[in-house]
Amino acid sequence: MPEIPPPTSAAHKQRLIAAYTDEAHYNTGRYRGLAMVSMRLADAPALGEAVDALLQASGVAECKWEKVRSARTRFAAAKLLDWALIQAQQGTLRLDALTWDTEVASRAGQGVPHITNLRKMYRALLERVTPARWGSDASWQLYPDEQSAMPWERLIAGLPQIASVTVCRSHEQPLIQLADLFAGLAVYSRDGYDLYERWLCDPPELRGLSLVPPDENDPTARYSASDRARCLLLDDFFTTCKFRHLGVSLRTRRGLFTGDPAKPLAFHWWMP
């Protein structure tokens, strides 16, 4: 897809914003989502290199939500999330995750094909969220993960804040992997909340927190390695958000949610 040329004036260059996006479970499950990591365009190369360095230090070539299934990938994901929270608090980047409930959409008479719904959600993110981020006069350069069914030129029509769209491959762009991680975490916090709540109430030996790890081959094991890794990651992430006063709730709404969308880290819930 040809790029739409960005503005070239000196004034606009000072307000250029880069945004990296990806989605999670857009065609499966009750809860689905997408996320956006945004920053000043001038800061994007250094931030991308920092994420890449964290991945290399963790011995992980790629860190996306679907790969968070073991202690190793959990540690890598935790490093990325902690780094991102620090950057958000410092004002270097912003993080937005948008999740939706397909059952609510169906009851509202909006039971449409999943790809059509995904397009609507991307449009909602770009139309409602981006103007409130980095100032209303910012000019955005969008870098989404490749998705052949997304008509980007049509999606950004009538959105003057979106100056260009450059489709990327996530394994080549660490900041898209970060967006994927946030999208997956946001969806899991809602879709897997019942399991997380049960895990939270169990004793350490069942939760995988004891000195002797559970037997992976035990057919009576209460949680899989993937369950334990994701519950631990979600719990640590939420605890860190509370410690840093980021305004994120989890148990009140049974899923990650930010009451004040102006926060640098915002979990939005789409409602019809």
Image: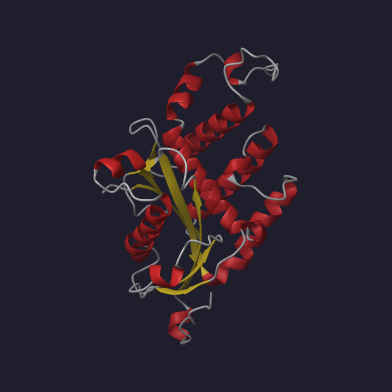
Left or right of 186 on screen, residue 49: right
Residue depicted at 32% across the width and 38% down the height: 103
Q: Where 233 sits versus 128, above or below?
A: above
Whether 236 is drawn above or below 167: the answer is above
Q: Nearer the viewer, residue 38 or 123?
A: 123
Residue depicted at 33% across the width and 31% down the height: 252
Indicate left or right for 40 with 162 as reference: right
Residue 245 spot, x, y in % from top left: 41, 42
| 59 lies left or right of 174 | right
Q: Would residue 3 appear left or right of 257 to someone viewing this image?
A: right
Q: Residue furthest left?
A: 108
Is residue 256 depicted above or below 83 in this figure? above
Query: Splitting the image into 4 quarters, where does residue 124 fall?
Result: bottom left
- Rendered location of residue 163, percent (x, y): 44, 76
Residue nearest the observer in this picture, 2 or 106: 106
Toward the front, the furthest residue is: 113
How does the figure colour the protein chain or chains? secondary structure
x and y, in percent, of residue 203 in the image: 54, 13
